[in-house]
Amino acid sequence: MRAYAVVRSRKRRTLCLQISPSGTLRVLVPAATRETDVWAFVKAKTPWIERTLERLSRAPKPPPFADGLILRHLDESLVLRLTYHAAAPSVRRDGDELHVTAATEEAARAGVERWYREAARHHALARIIHFAPLVGRAPKRIRIAGQKTRWGSCSARGTISLNWRLMMVPAGLCDYVIAHELCHLIAAHHKPSFWRELARVMPDYETRRLTLHGMGAQLSL
């Protein structure tokens, strides 16, 4: 059996298995779950794990972070124009180019991430304003995060967290995640009633979900 990390939470009620684009396995479990039950759960999921890891191994690897890299920005493509200079990092968009100046690659990457996070904040607010009336619920708070294994989440307190990397997938797929998380304000689970609610708001959600499922390993950052 493959190695996995166990993450315990007092708020969690069910067991959940996550596989990151790099192939790392995590099992999210209620705090009191016995190790034997975790092991049995992972063992039962072995066929799915192997299929997922095989799919990830065949996925194209992201290109190196360098001048000329093509970055996705929703339905657009931006050309990274990278200049290394001993100065404070700066990022600006000029047409279809993203100009980044930084002292090191690490600083340049951080600058690009900050730029995407700010873009994600504005875009998410606009799309939530669009979808909230359709769903019939609005979040109490919007949070832009950098989850390694999730595109989004909705807390019991009404906070919707969205991965800034959603700005690097097509706009229709970003819309899917936003509508999905808004529907969790009505149904905080993935039972049939939740999917019916999502289908009411977004009839083609299943096609979008399946497309998004394979996107993680293709992102450039």
Image (cartoon, helix red, strand yellow):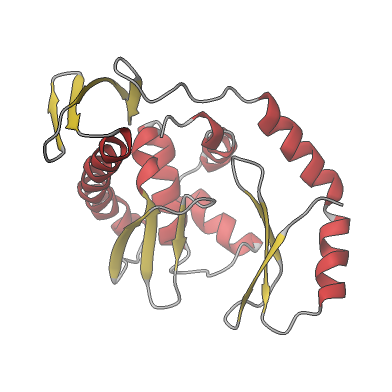
Instruction: Using the image, determine if residue 124 lies above or below residue 194.
Output: above
Count of numbered circles in the view: 0
Percent position of residue 188, x then y:
53, 70
Instruction: Using the image, determine if residue 103 lies above or below residue 205.
Output: above
State the image quarter where residue 18 is shown: bottom right
Q: Residue furthest top?
A: 68
Relative side of 25 to 184, left or right: right
Percent position of residue 61, x then y:
56, 24
Instruction: Using the image, determine if residue 19 lies above or below residue 73.
Output: below
Q: Quadrant of the C terminus?
A: top left
Q: Nearer the viewer, residue 148 or 180?
A: 148
Q: Nearer the viewer, residue 185 or 165?
A: 165
State the image quarter where residue 14 is shown: bottom right
Residue at 71% across / 68% down in the picture? 15
State the image quarter where residue 211 is shown: top right
Residue at 40% across / 60% down in the picture? 182
Relative side of 126 to 195, left or right: left
Percent position of residue 68, x then y:
30, 14
Q: Nearer the viewer, residue 182 or 44?
A: 44
Relative side of 101 to 44, left or right: left
Percent position of residue 155, x then y:
44, 71
Residue at 81% across / 79% down in the picture? 34
Residue at 47% across / 49% down in the picture? 151
